Image (cartoon, rainbow, N blue to C red):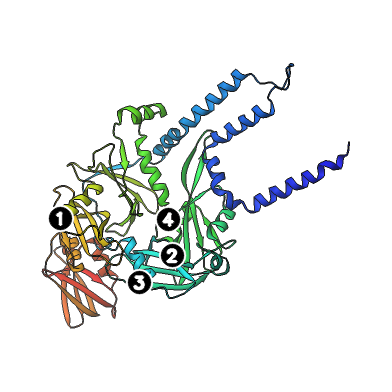
């Protein structure tokens, strides 16, 4: 026998394995499909065993496997495959069991999303003057503590994506209907939209393979541009896996990658006001709330037959901007907010889930009175505008907001081309009343006061600021330009108090006054 005959096969096998290892990011989706569902691997191994140890000829053979044994094994594995999803969700529910809060949410009214994602993209793409560049899909991120839309400036076309680097990021203010943008041009050595070895996914999967990446969010901190990518890892449970927050990647302008654990990410100063809990995991956790019973079989029985306390995570169709929504509380904390409806044909609001966007701490908010959900809120807006040409316009992005303790759905009405915002509507989730505004000032007044009132704006430099205590209450005297303004802690929200305390002499500010009270302070 020629022993050298097997050497070429061995060498070829080694070369193939090395190539597969080097190009492993390209096979990530396929590998993770099996990793997340290990029962599939066992089924393939059993099928391989059947082929390998199948009977040969008509004589007896030690390589034979009883068909009955094979049949039992296949049925067992298929049963485990059926139970795997329910087992994973039951375990996920136990990992993220929410605390219950009843009543209103103390959310900021000065960080409400006014500009829809589609319109922000139109504003942004219309400013790109480079022939070989375009914009990536938008993502929600933070700029100086304020939520904004972010768009990477990426090479346009297959050939350019190989030759060129990302050119930076364009941020669009979501708190106004105007095209208010900030462009940070900085060549990124690693980023989305590039091919091959400088592609963001390629680099990150080389760093940490058996994880799923969340959206890459742009972070501009101390004059440097970073890409922040939270990721999901999995606890292996033999026949199923349970997703969890694995950590956060931070990629700098030069392509250097940091892989932070959740604890390290929470303590990192660059991420202090940044959403780092994976948005993608939020949806999984909310959907796992349907698996609230103690056992896997009890959950399957409930979801198939009884539907007790079953919820549905509903997205308004054909709009591309799914829940959860990033909201800001009055104390500045960021939350992923998800509104859910009851299972079936009902469209009321079953609950709102809040997950701390930094720690993943979860809260469930229930309401005493029946409330309308986001899908039907759009129908009420269309009913309030019976003569409106809905073939040319569309109502998008129902966002939950709380005004004086009442839940309203904020809905933007935009042209189907996305070129601007025609109207902003608010639907009272309890009474179904609809308020529609065309002026941005009126929208802000309604958010602050629950009604539209006349306002005054005082602009200028901060000339002086004094504070004193009277009747156990802190009072301030603020001199802006040639105006002297008086206010007290009892007249201000926590958010406005923080803004007031952050003012320094010489700051250029705009103070909004309504009915003699300060309702907003802008730098």
Q: CA distance from mark 4 to mark 1?
A: 43 Å
Q: Looking at the image, is mark 3 or mark 4 nearer the viewer? A: 3
Element at badge 2?
A: strand
Tell me if label 4 and label 1 are in contact, CB under 8 Å.
no
Q: List the residue tagged with mark 1.
A: 386
**Sooner in the amino-acid sequence: mark 2 or mark 1:** 2
Please state if 10 lies on the left or on the right of 417 as rendered.
right
Count of numbered tags: 4
Please state if 385 lies on the left or on the right of 337 as rendered.
left
Q: List the residue tagged with mark 2.
A: 219
**Sooner in the amino-acid sequence: mark 2 or mark 3:** 3
Question: Residue at left 66%, top 29%?
Answer: 51
Q: CA distance from mark 3 to mark 4?
A: 23 Å
| Rendered image: mark on residue 276 | 4
Indicate whether 117 appears above or below 355: below
**Sooner in the amino-acid sequence: mark 4 or mark 2:** 2
**Sooner in the amino-acid sequence: mark 1 or mark 3:** 3
Question: Which residue, as the protein is rendered here, is positioned at the far bottom?
Answer: 482
Q: Residues within 10 Å of mark 1 (few under 14, many from 20)?
A: few
Of 327 and 345, the residue lying toward us: 345
Q: Pick the quarter of the image with the C terminus.
A: bottom left
Of 416 and 485, the residue lying toward us: 416
Indicate whether 432 appears above or below 186: above
């Amino acid at each position: 026998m020629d022993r050298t005959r097997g050497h070429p096969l061995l060498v070829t096998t080694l070369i193939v394995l090395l190539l597969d290892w080097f190009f492993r990011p390209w096979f990530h989706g396929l590998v993770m499909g099996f990793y997340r569902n290990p029962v599939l691997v066992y089924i393939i191994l059993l099928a391989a065993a059947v082929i390998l140890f199948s009977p040969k000829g008509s004589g007896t053979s030690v390589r034979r496997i009883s068909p009955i044994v094979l049949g039992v094994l296949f049925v067992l594995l298929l049963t485990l495959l059926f139970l795997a999803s329910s087992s994973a969700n039951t375990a996920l529910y136990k990992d993220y069991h929410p605390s219950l809060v009843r009543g209103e949410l103390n959310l900021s009214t000065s960080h409400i999303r006014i500009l829809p994602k589609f319109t922000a993209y139109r504003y942004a793409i219309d400013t790109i003057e480079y022939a070989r560049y375009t914009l990536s899909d938008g993502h929600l991120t933070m700029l100086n503590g304020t939520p904004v839309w972010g768009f990477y400036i990426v090479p346009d076309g297959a050939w350019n994506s190989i030759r060129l680097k990302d050119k930076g990021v364009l941020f669009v203010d979501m708190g106004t209907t105007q095209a208010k943008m900030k462009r940070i041009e900085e060549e990124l050595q690693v980023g989305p939209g590039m091919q091959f070895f400088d592609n963001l996914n390629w680099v990150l999967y080389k760093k940490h393979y058996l994880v799923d990446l969340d959206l890459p969010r742009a972070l501009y901190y101390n004059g440097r541009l970073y890409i922040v990518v939270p990721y999901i890892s999995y606890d292996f449970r033999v026949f199923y896996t349970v997703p969890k927050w694995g950590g956060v990647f931070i990629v700098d302008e030069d392509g250097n990658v940091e892989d932070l654990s959740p604890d390290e990410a929470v303590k990192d100063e660059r991420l202090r006001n940044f959403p780092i809990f994976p948005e993608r995991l939020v949806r999984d956790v909310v959907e796992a709330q349907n698996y609230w019973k103690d056992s896997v079989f009890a959950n399957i029985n409930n979801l198939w037959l009884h539907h007790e306390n079953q919820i549905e995570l509903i997205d308004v169709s054909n709009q591309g901007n799914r829940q959860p929504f990033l909201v800001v509380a009055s104390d500045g904390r960021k939350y992923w907010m998800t509104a859910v409806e009851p299972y079936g044909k009902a469209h009321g609001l079953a609950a709102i889930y809040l997950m701390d966007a930094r720690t993943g701490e979860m809260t469930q908010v229930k309401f005493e009175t029946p409330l309308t959900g986001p899908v039907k809120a759009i129908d009420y807006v269309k009913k309030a505008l019976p003569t409106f040409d809905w073939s040319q316009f569309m109502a998008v992005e129902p966002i939950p907001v709380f005004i004086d303790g009442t839940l309203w759905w904020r809905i933007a009405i935009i042209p189907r081309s996305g070129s601007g915002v025609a109207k902003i509507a608010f639907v009272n989730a309890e009474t179904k009343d609809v308020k529609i505004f065309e002026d941005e000032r009126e929208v802000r007044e309604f958010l602050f006061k629950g009604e539209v009132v006349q306002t005054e704006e005082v602009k200028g430099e901060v000339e002086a600021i004094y504070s004193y205590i009277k009747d156990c209450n802190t009072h301030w005297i603020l001199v802006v330009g040639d105006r002297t303004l008086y206010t007290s802690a009892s007249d201000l929200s926590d958010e406005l108090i923080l803004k007031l305390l952050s003012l320094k002499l010489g700051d250029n500010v705009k103070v909004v006054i309504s009915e003699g009270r300060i309702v907003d302070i802008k730098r």
